[in-house]
Each structure stands twice: as C-alpha cells, then as structure tokens.
Image: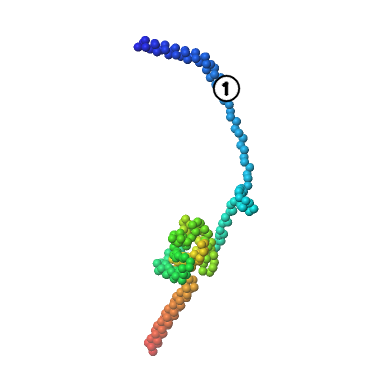
Amino acid sequence: MAKSKQTYEEIRQKRMEENKKRMKELNLTKLSQSLLSKPSPVKKAKPRTFRQATALTPVRRSTRVADKPTVSYKELPVEPMERTRRSYSYRRRGFGDYASSEARAHAIDKAEQIQSRLGADFPSFLKPMVQSHVSGCFWLGLPVYFCKSHLPLSDEVMTLEDENGDEFQTKYLAQKTGLSGGWRGFSIDHELVDGDALVFQLVSPTRFKVYFARAYDSEDNENKEDMVEDNEGKENTDNDKNSDSKHLDGIAKRTRASRK
C-alpha cells in the first residue's frame, strides 16, 4: 500500500511540474494578471431621440377620392343627458304601500283593455308596477323576449311619450334589458305607485308610447267619495237630532200630563 501511495504522489508531482512549465511557456500567468489589472470598459448609453408628432391624416392611395375633404378621426365627447330636479309635494294614494290583489287585478284588466284597442300595427307589452319600479332603486326591467325581438342590441337613449304628448329621455341598457337613467323622473312625475299597470307601445325603434291604468282612483274620485261620506255623516247626524227632539217632546208631554 505504501509503494502504491508513493508512486501516485510522485506521478501527481511530476504532472504538476509539467503543467507549470507549459503555463510558463505559454505566458498564461502573465496574461491572467494583465486581464485582472485592466478595468472593464463602460458602455456608453445612446441618447434618446423623440419623434415629432404628426397629424393623423389618412393616406389616400386612390385618385377617385383625392379631391374629397380629409376625414377627421377625432373623437367627439358625448353630451350627458339633462337632469331636471323636480320638487314633489303631493303623493298619490297608495304611494309607498303595497297594492292589494284586487287593486292590482283591476289595473291589469284596464291595461289589457287599453292594449286590445291599440291594434297590431306596432308591438306592445303590458308591465305591472311593483315597489322596485316606483321607489327605491327605480329600475324597470322589460320583457326579455320583447327586447331581443324589437329593441336595439346596444345601449340607447329611449324616449317615453305619455298620453299628453310629454316626452321623457331614459337610458336603455341592452345587456340588462331594462330602463335605468331617466325612469325615476318619469315615475315620480306621473305619480306611479305599486299596483299600477302600464302599456308600452313601440312606435319607433327608440320611442315608446306609454298608457296608464291606475290601481287606485284618481284624486277627483277620491274627493267625490269623501263628499259622499260627508253627506252620509250629515244625514246620520240630522236623523239623530230628529230622534232626540222627538224623544224630548214625548218626555215634556208626559210631565205636563202628570202636573195636571
């Protein structure tokens, strides 16, 4: 074992000496030291050059359109819809309350009669009102089948025309199939309550003619009912007074007869 180790060490020493001689002959040690002493070159950054802004004019390649005016691709801002703030002091009977089943059915019957008189020249649909339509979020969802068949495929401004010819601008959301902006003002201005039924007739691609069927009587009918109730109350009080006077007359006659 000792002989094998010595022979290995001797071989290793010889190999190392040979390698050193070769390195000296090739001057590798001097080259490595010279490379370490020299600093690495620093790269110079190129200055930035900015392009000058040019006008966006279309390139006309055809002589047929060379004499025509240039097209402007500048985007025009969309004007927002005007919102009119109204103050409402009067509220119809039933505002904020849930309509009874009888009042709701009465309004739907009247709306069906209105829709039957419109004919089939323009498409129409019937929409009963619930609390979310006339209060709170004021969101009016339209029938999906009607929207897919007759209304625009993208968001559009719809005009609602009432029975008096007054117009209201509303925002139609195609993805949600409903009316959002502007519907609140229409609902409050016409004093819609839960239970009312509306008939929407599409007279043009972006215009509805709206007809109303009220769940409750109008203010005039309410006043008439109040007058009838007041008259009935007066008649009852008159009858009570007459009965009281007759009773007193009978008592007076009996007291006179007893004195005699």
Residue 143: percent from the left, percent from the top? Answer: 44, 61
Looking at this view, name the residue that lies furthest to the bottom: 260
Residue 57: percent from the left, percent from the top? Answer: 62, 48
Viewer-closest of 147 and 189: 147
Viewer-closest of 170 and 125: 125
Q: Amino acid at mark 1?
A: Lys
**On-image quarter of the N terminus:** top left
- What residue is at 43 percent from the left and 64 percent from the top? 98
Q: Is residue 242 above or below residue 40?
A: below
Looking at this view, name the residue that lies furthest to the top: 3
Viewer-closest of 15 and 163: 15
Q: Is residue 87 above or below residue 55?
A: below
Can residue 114 be seen in the rendering of this structure?
no
Q: Is residue 259 above or below residue 136?
A: below
**On-image quarter of the C terminus:** bottom left
SS at badge 1: loop
Describe the colour scheme in one phrase: rainbow
Residue 90: percent from the left, percent from the top? Answer: 51, 66
- What residue is at 43 percent from the left and 68 percent from the top? 108
- What residue is at 63 percent from the left and 45 percent from the top? 54
Residue 212: percent from the left, percent from the top? Answer: 48, 68
Looking at this view, name the residue that lies furthest to the left: 1
Can residue 258 be seen in the rendering of this structure?
yes
- What residue is at 47 percent from the left and 75 percent from the top? 224
In the rendered image, which residue does mark 1 sit on? Answer: 38
- How packed is label 1: few (under 14 Cα within 10 Å), some, or many (20 or more)? few
